[in-house]
Amino acid sequence: MPNSPDRSRDDASRLLRRCSLFAALDDAALRLVAGHAHRRRFDAGEVIFRIGSPGQSMMAVLAGTVRITAASVDGKEIVLADLGGGEVFGEMALLDGRERSADATALTNCDLLVLERRDMLSVLERHPAVAIKLLEVLCERLRRTDQQIGEIAFLGLPMRLAKALLRIAAGTPQAKLALSQRELGTMIGGTRESVNRCLREWQRRGILQLDEGWIIIRNADALEEIGRGNVKET
């Protein structure tokens, strides 16, 4: 027996509640938003949207990981963010109705909740707390992007790589990261070969371990020092 509209709305409400963006909404407002939302699934590697495409919706990640990328001036792909469950994306186009400013791709199988601009604008008008939270999300993304661009422009590859690994590890002392060296290269504006040389040297020094596609951080403090430029790389 198919789900009733009320059951589907309740399910969507529970899913939206996981997103910090909607935490300020009361149950009635959350159900209102959920009534306009619809779910979409994307397979790993599938394009969600491309830069320049029409931007009439925002999306919340229910499950999986979405990769946001852009092209550098020399045509290289740069990873701007990997977004997991509870995070939102597409908020810039939702606010101004203009074209997408980056590419979004399903890094893994993804389950998304799609919120159309025409519906969300009325929610933002009636619930200023949600509008303020959305602006906070947008500002944090811009700060992160500015930091990443600055690192690529001014820091050497070892410093960029160390900072990227620490950001991904989120402070876990013995982090185990499933990242390819090519993926790391696109994140920091380097080549797979240069990343490989750096990781091999750090493995030799006991800072990390490379194990069948995994990068296991053994000494986060040493990476911190490299990221600060306090360690001379050979």
Image (spheres, helix red, strand yellow):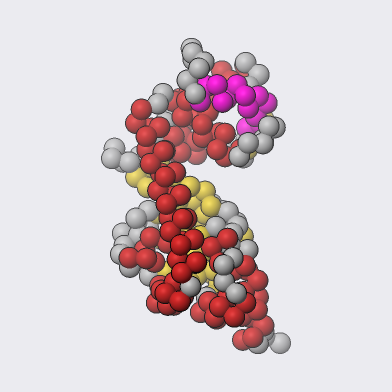
Classify residue 151 as left or right of residue 168: left
Report the residue at 33% width, 65% height from top: 96
SS majority, magenta: helix
Q: Please say whether residue 222 is one of the residues in the magenta stretch.
A: yes
- Residue 214 location, quadrant: top right
The residue depicted at 43 percent of the width and 59 percent of the height is 135
70 horizontally vs 108: left or right = left
- In this picture, residue 30 sits left or right of residue 192: right
Residue 159, compared with residue 38, is above or below; it is above
**Which quadrant of the structure image shows residue 2?**
bottom right
Answer with the quarter of the image where residue 56 lies. Answer: bottom left
Residue 81 horizontal/vertical position (percent): 48, 47
The correct choice, above or below, for 141 with respect to 21 in the image is above
Q: Residue at x 37, y 65 (%)?
A: 95
| Residue at image location 39% in from the left, 66% down from the top | 94
Q: Nearer the viewer, residue 133 or 58?
A: 133
Residue 161 falls left or right of residue 101: right
Q: Find the magenta span and give its range.
A: 215-227
